Image (cartoon, helix red, strand yellow):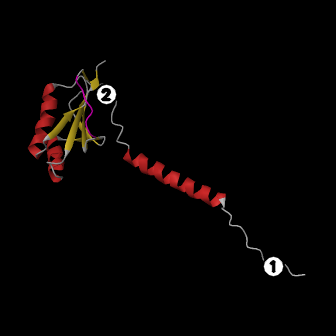
Amino acid sequence: MMRYLEPRKARIEIVPMIDIMFFLLVFFVIAMLRMIPSSGIASQLPHSSTATDVPHPKVLVELTKNGSALVDDKPITLPELSRRLAHNDPAKTAVTIASDQGTSVQSLMAVMDACRTAGVTQIALAAKVQR
């Protein structure tokens, strides 16, 4: 006796779907890790009672207690900083200066002058909110 072929019900395979979900998860985790800003140096930022959040800067300049400047955790001189900022579009470049509490005002002004010499108009100072 011959049995007619009955149509098979469609079956969803779970294992390949789980594999694809894990690949997507790994892709997004790696993509997000690339978006995390550099950790920077350990410094004690000055406190301010009127500090507000600013958008993520395109350039983060870190100023140490001895007055040296760091960009991307690498030491940089002020003329090099001006050249680097002028190389990009200075009108659209946002610079945030994160200085240590013990940094002299003269060092801070020298970095700000280097930014202004390059044509940067958006300069912010990093600070901790005083509570």
- Relative image position of residue 13 (x, y in whole percent): 66, 61
Query: Is residue 86 positioned above or below 112 on the image?
Result: below
**The image quarter in which residue 59 lies:** top left
How far is the residue under mark 1 from the one under mark 2?
79 Å
Give the quadrant of the C terminus. top left
Disc 2 marks which residue?
Answer: 43
The residue located at (18%, 41%) in the rendering is 77
Cβ atoms at labels 1 and 2 below 8 Å apart: no
Dominant secondary structure of the magenta stretch?
loop
Report the side of 12 relative to 62 (left or right): right
- Relative image position of residue 123 (x, y in whole percent): 17, 37
Closer to viewer: mark 1 or mark 2:
1
The residue located at (90%, 81%) in the rendering is 1
Look at the image and say whether residue 26 sits in the magenta stretch.
no
Look at the image and say whether residue 52 sits in the magenta stretch.
yes
Q: Residues within 10 Å of mark 2 (few under 14, many from 20)?
A: some
Give the residue type that dot 1 points to: Tyr
What span is in magenta? 50-55
Report the side of 26 relative to 61 (left or right): right
Q: Residue furthest top?
A: 131
**The image quarter in which residue 97 lies:** top left
Disc 1 marks which residue?
Answer: 4
Helix or strand or loop: what does disc 2 sit on?
loop
Give the residue type that dot 2 points to: Ser
Q: Looking at this view, is 90 or 81 the one in front? A: 90
